[in-house]
Image (cartoon, rainbow, N blue to C red):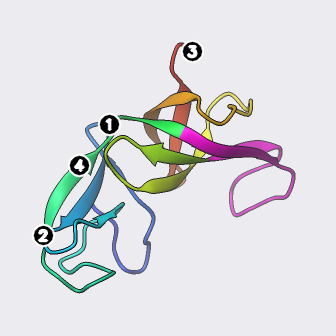
Amino acid sequence: MTPPTPADPRPCLIGGRIAGSTCTACGHNAARRHPRCERCLGNTIATDFGPTGVVWSSATVHLRIGELTPPFVLAYIDVDAGPRVLAQVVGGNEIPAGGLVRFTGEENGNLTVKAVGQ
């Protein structure tokens, strides 16, 4: 996988971890690689986050979005030692807040996760 471009700002996985960046000035974590911090414009270093995270919220979507055919489940994930990201849940079942997930890959450019233990 290649890191995202400004034309496609979605996070991407490299080796099962999110390719991101951390600001050396303010410590802000971003879910994509930036040469400058999006908050303070300080310098950043490449940082990989994951491979797991905790569900903040999830919902079943009943509308077609791009190539995603409904119904499908999206979840906001608080990535281990990193930022919060949006991901598609593999298997189609909502995961309650606080549930542990593992990043499983990408589908149509979107991160995918699966509940740990499934």
Q: Nearer the viewer, residue 61 or 78?
A: 78
Which stretch is magenta? 55-75
Residue 2 visible, this orientation:
no
Lateral position of residue 19 relative to residue 85, left or right: left
Q: Is residue 23 above or below residue 18?
A: below
* Relative image position of residue 25 (x, y in whole percent): 15, 75
Label 2 vs label 3, nearer the camera:
2
Q: Do callouts 4 and 1 mark residues in contact (Cβ within 8 Å)? A: no
> Of label 3 and label 4, which has the lower sequence position?
4
Q: Residues within 10 Å of mark 3 (few under 14, many from 20)?
A: few
- Residue 16 disc label: 1
Query: Residue tagged by mark 2?
Result: 24
Label 4 vs label 1, nearer the camera:
4
Residue at 19%, 54% (x, y): give it.
Answer: 47
> Of label 4 and label 1, which has the lower sequence position?
1
Amino acid, disc 3: Gln
Query: Residue tagged by mark 3?
Result: 118
Query: Residue tagged by mark 4?
Result: 48
* Relative image position of residue 105 (x, y in whole percent): 44, 39
Amino acid, disc 1: Gly
Residue 51 visible, this orientation:
yes
Please tell me whether mark 1 sits on a helix, a strand or a loop: loop
Q: Nearer the viewer, residue 26 or 19?
A: 26
